[in-house]
Image (cartoon, rainbow, N blue to C red):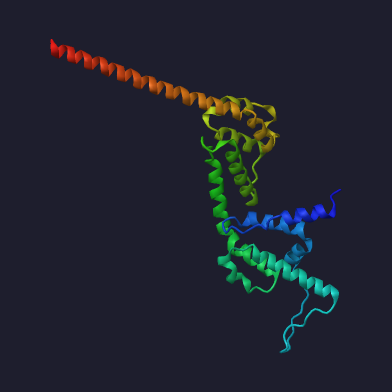
Amino acid sequence: MESLSEATQTISALKLPMLKTRDCDLWSMRMEQYLTYTNYAFWEVIVNGDAPVVASTSTEGPIPPKTAEQRLARKNELKAKSTLLLAIPDEHQLKFHGIKDAKSLWEAIKTRFGGNKESKKIHKTILKQQYKNFTASKSEGLDKTYDRFQKLISQLEIHGEVISPKDANLKFLRSLPSAWNTHTLIMQNKADLDSLSMDDLYNNLKVYEADIKGQSTTSLNSQNVAFVSSENTSSTNEAVNTAHDVSAASS
C-alpha cells in the first residue's frame, strides 16, 4: 500500500494543467482529474458552489466565517479559485480575476474558451474532416503518427463522436506509408480487428518498425548507388565522345 510520504511526493510531482485557449474541453477534463486527485474538496467547491454565504447588507462589509466548518469551506473556496486562476494564461488574468467564486469562474472559462453550441458544431465538423483525411508522414515515424491520431480520436469523443475500434484500427493502418503495406494488409484481414484496442495495434506494429526503417535505408542506399553509377557512366560516355571528336578532328 502506498505510504503517506509516497502519496505526497506523487501529488507534488503533478503539474497544474495550463489552459490552451483552443483546447478548452481537454483542459477541463485534465483539471478535473488534477483537482480530484490533489484535493477533492476543491473540485466539490467548483461543481457545487458550496462556499458559505458571508455577504452582508450592512455597511461594514462581508461577515467573516465564524465556525470551523465555515472557515474550512471558505479556505477551500479561495484555494479552488486561486488554482483555476493559476491555470489561466497571463493575458486573460484581468478578465477573470474579478469573479467572486470558483464555480462562477469555472463556468466563465468554459463559456469563453469552450464556445457555444454553434461553434462546437463547426469544430466537430472540422475534426471529422481531419479524421477522414488523416495520413501519416514518412518523416514523423510510428510514435508521432500514433500520438497525433490518438489526440484526434480523443477530441472527437469529447464532442460526442464515438469511433468504433474496428473503424479506428482500419483508418490508422490505411494511413501508414507504403513501406508498411505488407504488414498492414496482413493485420487488416485479422478476425479480431474489431475488438483489438488501439494500444495493442500500436504494439503489434512497433515490432516491425525496425524492419521498415531498415528497408527504407536499403532502398535509399540503392538509389544513391544507382545515381552514382549513372553519373559515372555519363562521365565515361562523355570522355569517349570527346576523344572520338578529337581523333576525328586530327584526321
Nearest the eye: 243 or 84: 243
Q: Is residue 64 left or right of residue 91?
A: right
Residue 77, quarter of the rendered image: bottom right
Location of the C terminus by quadrant is top left
Instruction: Residue 108: give x, y in percent of width and height.
Output: 63, 67
Q: Is residue 115 left or right of residue 198?
A: left
Q: Residue at x 22, y 14 (%)?
A: 243
**Depicted 151 relative to depicted 235: above or below:** below
Nearest the eye: 207 or 162: 207
Residue 18, quarter of the rendered image: bottom right
Q: Residue at x 62, y 43 (%)?
A: 150
Instruction: Residue 70: give x, y in percent of width and height.
Output: 82, 75
Looking at this view, name the residue that lies furthest to the top: 251
Instruction: Residue 28: give x, y in percent of width and height.
Output: 66, 58
| Whether residue 232 is visible | yes
Instruction: Residue 185: give x, y in percent of width and height.
Output: 59, 26
Nearest the eye: 228 or 106: 228
